[in-house]
Image (cartoon, rainbow, N blue to C red):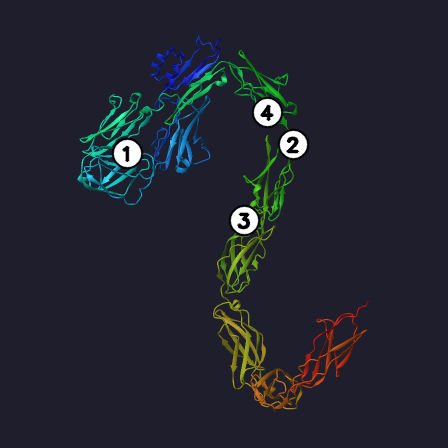
């Protein structure tokens, strides 16, 4: 069978020899190579080889082989060509790197770099995985890619520990790097409890345990003896195991007595800790045979090229000597430098190093031998990798172009993982759509454009044609066949929907592949939002209504000044309203900060449309700024200010307000100019009071409303001036004989106009032309008394009061007439004196004086109680009667009358005596009986008998009313019966009480008389 194509495969030199073992002939630029010649060529590191058709090849399939050598080589055996990755860390600096040996451990401080190194001739993308999960290098500052290196900033143990792997990708395919394991080294402290002393006989061996604290990573051990570090490099008697940290003394000498401390160091963690000291003491002497205390494992596995360390140490007296040999009789390899002592180290392990090893410890008392059961074994010996396809061979039957690409073989066991890579190129094949099929479904909108790709794999290149159903498509203005075979249809209509078939043909065959084109209606915003002016506090609606293909789902969203409005969170002010095809946005209680650009975005699975509108929110202006007082006088102040924000509506008017210590809050003030327009930033405040502290503020107004006031200006005081407001309420009179008393209402501080304020009092007798002037310097004074023995009582004076301060004398008040002081009454009231009536607790006296000497205008009425305290009642004006209450019943009282005026009280009148009446009866009427006939009610009750100290019953009062809140009617009678004629349309309440000289007595209980029913 003819082989109609050939393959080119790039193989890594690391696995080239094994590949040749499968009897394939390779062609290089120098001709055919046999396996033997290939081994020779491999030594030259030639990297590219070609697979040639061989005449005796009978099958049509191609076999690509990745064969694993029975013994897994060193980590460099399978060189990951053309890509390889390695890991690096930098403990403390950015330039130290960590190799990618699996399980490698390094100390990680603050910065770590894992590097992916790419073969220079092979471009491509690099990605990283941590524990099998992709690392997103675009979304985290924690990771960054530097030339293929993975840089980890601030590594954290919980977050960054794990296995890392690099993926390299280019147009030929993707391969994986070896894995890098990232660990964080740590070393904790020893326990702080003291250690017990160890006592041993002289000459015997002893083991001092280190007791390694919790840790991770490689450790090194040293011991400190009496504060000095033990140097055991050439000491055959003492040994420190680097596996356990224990200190072994083969034979204890007297000078070994002392304190021993185990010191543990971690290079990766950059830390050293010390245990508690152990005291060693002697008990005597004695020889002993060797006893091996430090033993190596029965079986040790090692990877090829690695190093193996075996430890062996024995105790005994005399000190045992340690020697090593192979159990099979072969001599130790020459590369082993130290064949005696407690450590046997085999560098660069090879197959010849496999076998059983023995440690022999001997002294004069005997010999002790320790040997490995299975010896040293190379990992993977006698086994084939578990990752294989038909014994490690990858078969590709029915080769086609889609099989071209990169192939990677991974060999793995518990010690290591290695990779081998190969590139396969198939350069001759029939058309094939398996890798790049035609898109099965294309959806486009009316009027749009679509390109349907047709890129089959074929070698040589296939000739492409298109069909729609059974119809062969011809090119026209709308339908174009592109050079790469793709079909482009523009200005699409509904008739373009259907199944499109791509037909690819070359000399090796023909292939077809089809896709379906679906045509949808376009999405159009029919009612977009429009630019709007709004006033603060209003609610507005921005419309956004669309027409769309009903089979497509609509998604509306709004943005404000470039930021998306999340309506699902129920943001205050914003709410979406409308039906399915409407995404109207309502803005409730709109505020100034809502001014800006609003965009309505409508999106379907095929297209998106947007419409924008500018919203201007107008509000009252903001407060003016920087209000200053530029000049001040006694009554004016010049102000200036800077405009605040106008909130999208120009300022029309400014107004000025003031505040003083005497005002209640801020008050509007007059200015010049009287009306301050919005372009004026200066004004003079007028009509101020001199010598008063003022604060000023400015308020701006526009067509929307009045804005917030500015911050107050600095506090300042107007200049002083002569006072202009005279005192008011000028009055006086009274006082003693020869006195003229003048009073006035003080002038408030706000009107005093300056310091040194006082009053000027001027007066003269009525009819005189000469004024007497007096100065009252006290600001708070409101009274002046002028004394002169020559003043006649109750003489009229003309009086006026003025003001002054340090600036001069001010205005005087108008003239008022004030009388001088009176003389006290000289005579007692005279005339008839009568007691009009008296009761148990009051009396009424009628005093008829015959004259009122010295113009007395009041009377002083005194009354006395026998053997009791006297009382006094004062009445004003020409009153000649007074009712006195609150007296005792059945008691004798005496009363006199004296006249008084502002000058004093006159002599008393002749006393008058009176006895108050007895108390009224205390018992109410009892045994009340009533009878109701039509509109008449008959009442009967028993006569009330009084006590000795009570007034006699003179009669009875009957009180009746419809309810407790209505007015009571009274019927008086001297009998113990009565008849009432009332229309009983409602219930009536009736009570009866006694009548006596001492007043009304107690009432009976209320009697309820029900209304007469009309039925």
Q: Nearer the viewer, residue 782 or 505?
A: 505
Q: Which one is earlier in the sequence, the residue at label 1 or at label 2?
A: 1
Distance from the alpha carbon under mark 1 to that under mark 2: 78 Å
Confirm or deny contact between disc 2 and disc 3 (CB under 8 A).
Answer: no
Distance from the alpha carbon under mark 2 to that under mark 3: 49 Å
Q: Nearer the viewer, residue 672 or 362?
A: 362
Q: Nearer the viewer, mark 4 or mark 1?
A: 1
Q: Which mark is residue 242?
A: 1
Q: Nearer the viewer, mark 1 or mark 2?
A: 1
* Location of mark 2 (residue): 550
Q: Secondary structure beneath disc 1?
A: loop
Q: Secondary structure beneath disc 3?
A: loop
Q: Secondary structure beneath disc 4?
A: strand
Q: Is residue 896 above or below residue 455?
A: below
Q: Which one is earlier in the sequence, the residue at label 4 or at label 1?
A: 1
- State left or right for residue 353 relative to residue 419: left
Q: Which mark is residue 441?
A: 4
Q: Secondary structure beneath disc 2?
A: loop
Q: Which one is earlier in the sequence, the residue at label 2 or at label 3?
A: 2
Confirm or deny contact between disc 2 and disc 4 (CB under 8 A).
Answer: no
């Amino acid at each position: 069978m003819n082989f109609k194509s050939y393959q080119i495969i790039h193989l890594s030199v690391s696995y080239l020899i094994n590949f040749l073992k499968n009897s394939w002939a390779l062609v290089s630029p120098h001709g055919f190579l046999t396996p033997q010649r290939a081994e020779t060529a491999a030594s030259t590191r030639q990297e590219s080889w070609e697979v040639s058709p061989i005449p005796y090849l009978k099958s049509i399939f191609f076999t690509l082989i990745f064969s694993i050598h029975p013994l897994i080589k060193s980590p460099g055996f399978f060189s990951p060509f053309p890509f390889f990755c390695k890991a690096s860390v930098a403990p403390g600096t950015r330039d130290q790197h960590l190799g990618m040996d699996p399980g490698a451990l390094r100390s990680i401080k603050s910065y770590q770099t894992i590097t992916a190194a790419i073969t220079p001739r092979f471009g491509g993308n690099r990605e990283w995985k941590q524990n099998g999960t992709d690392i997103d290098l675009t979304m985290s500052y924690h990771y960054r890619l530097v030339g293929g290196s993975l840089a980890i900033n601030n590594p954290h143990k919980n977050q960054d520990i794990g296995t890392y792997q690099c993926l390299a990708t280019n147009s030929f395919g993707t391969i994986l790097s070896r894995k890098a394991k990232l660990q964080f080294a740590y070393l904790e402290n020893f326990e702080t409890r003291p250690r017990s002393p160890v006592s041993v006989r002289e000459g015997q061996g002893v083991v001092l345990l280190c007791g390694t604290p919790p840790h991770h990573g490689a450790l090194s051990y040293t011991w400190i003896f009496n504060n000095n570090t033990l140097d055991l490099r050439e000491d055959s008697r003492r040994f420190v195991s680097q596996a356990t940290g224990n200190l072994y003394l083969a034979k204890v000498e007297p000078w070994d007595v002392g304190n021993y401390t185990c010191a543990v160091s971690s290079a990766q963690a950059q830390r050293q800790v010390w245990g508690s000291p152990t005291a060693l003491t002697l008990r005597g002497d004695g020889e002993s045979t060797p006893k091996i205390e430090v033993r190596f494992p029965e079986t040790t596995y090692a990877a090829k090229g690695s190093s193996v360390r075996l430890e062996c140490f024995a105790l005994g007296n005399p000190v045992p000597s340690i020697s090593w040999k192979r159990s099979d009789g072969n001599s130790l390899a020459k590369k082993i430098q130290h064949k005696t002592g407690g450590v046997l180290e085999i560098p660069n392990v090879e197959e010849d190093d496999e076998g059983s090893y023995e440690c022999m410890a001997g002294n004069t008392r005997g010999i002790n031998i320790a040997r490995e059961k299975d010896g040293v074994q190379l990992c993977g010996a006698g086994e084939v990798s578990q990752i294989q396809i038909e014994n490690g061979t990858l078969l590709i039957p029915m080769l086609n172009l889609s099989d071209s690409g990169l192939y990677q073989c991974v060999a793995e066991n518990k010690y290591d993982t290695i990779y081998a890579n190969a590139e396969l190129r198939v350069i001759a094949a029939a058309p094939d759509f398996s890798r790049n099929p035609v898109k099965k479904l294309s959806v486009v909108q009316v009027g749009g454009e679509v390109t349907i790709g047709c890129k089959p794999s074929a070698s040589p290149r296939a000739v492409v044609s298109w069909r729609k159903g059974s119809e062969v498509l011809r090119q026209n203005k709308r339908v174009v066949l592109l050079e790469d075979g793709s079909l482009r249809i523009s200005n699409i209509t509904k008739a373009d929907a259907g199944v499109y078939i791509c037909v690819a043909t070359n000399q090796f065959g023909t292939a077809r592949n089809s896709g379906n084109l679906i045509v949808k209606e376009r999405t159009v915003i029919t009612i977009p939002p429009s630019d709007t002016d709004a006033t603060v506090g209003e609610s507005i609606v921005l419309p956004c209504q669309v027409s769309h293909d009903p089979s497509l789902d609509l998604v509306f969203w709004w943005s404000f000044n470039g930021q998306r409005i999340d309506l699902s969170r129920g943001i205050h002010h914003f709410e979406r309203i409308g039906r399915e095809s409407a995404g109207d946005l309502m803005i409730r209680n709109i505020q100034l900060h809502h001014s800006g650009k609003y965009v309505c975005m409508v999106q379907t699975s095929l297209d998106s449309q947007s419409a924008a509108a500018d919203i201007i929110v107008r509000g009252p202006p903001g407060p003016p700024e920087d209000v200053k007082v530029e000049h001040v006088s006694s009554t004016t102040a010049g102000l200036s200010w800077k405009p605040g924000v106008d909130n999208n509506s120009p300022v029309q008017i400014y107004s000025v307000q003031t505040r003083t210590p005497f005002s209640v809050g801020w008050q509007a003030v007059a200015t010049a100019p009287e009306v301050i327009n919005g372009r004026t930033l200066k004004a003079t405040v007028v009509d101020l009071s001199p010598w008063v502290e003022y604060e000023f503020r400015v308020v701006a107004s526009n067509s929307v409303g009045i804005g917030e006031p500015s911050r107050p200006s600095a506090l300042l005081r107007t200049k002083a001036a002569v006072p202009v407001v005279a005192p008011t309420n000028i009055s006086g009179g009274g006082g003693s004989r020869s006195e003229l008393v003048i009073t006035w209402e003080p002038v408030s501080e706000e009107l005093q106009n300056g310091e040194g304020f006082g009053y000027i009092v001027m007066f003269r007798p009525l009819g005189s032309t000469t004024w007497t002037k007096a100065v009252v310097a006290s600001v708070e004074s409101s009274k002046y008394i002028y004394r002169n023995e020559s003043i006649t009582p109750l003489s009229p004076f003309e009086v006026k009061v003025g003001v002054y301060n340090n600036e001069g004398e001010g205005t005087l008040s108008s003239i008022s007439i004030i009388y001088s002081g009176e003389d006290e009454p000289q005579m007692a009231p005279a005339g008839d004196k009568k007691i009009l009536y008296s009761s148990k607790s009051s009396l009424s006296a009628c005093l008829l004086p015959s004259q009122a000497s010295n113009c007395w205008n009041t009377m002083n009425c005194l009354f006395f109680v026998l053997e009791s305290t006297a009382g006094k009642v004062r009445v004003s004006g020409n009153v000649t009667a007074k009712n006195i209450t609150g007296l005792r019943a059945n008691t004798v009282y005496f009363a006199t009358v004296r006249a008084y005026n502002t000058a004093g009280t006159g002599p008393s009148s002749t006393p008058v005596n009176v006895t108050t009446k007895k108390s009224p009866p205390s018992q109410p009427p009892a045994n009340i009986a009533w009878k109701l006939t039509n509109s008449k009610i008959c009442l009967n009750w028993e006569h009330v008998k009084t006590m000795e100290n009570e007034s006699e019953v003179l009669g009875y009062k009957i009180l009746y009313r419809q309810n407790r809140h209505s007015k009571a009617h009274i019927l008086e009678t001297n009998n113990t019966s009565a008849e009432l004629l009332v229309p009983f349309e409602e219930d009536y309440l009736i009570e009866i009480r006694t009548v006596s000289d001492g007043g009304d007595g107690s009432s009976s209980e209320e009697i309820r008389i029900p209304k007469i029913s009309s039925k």
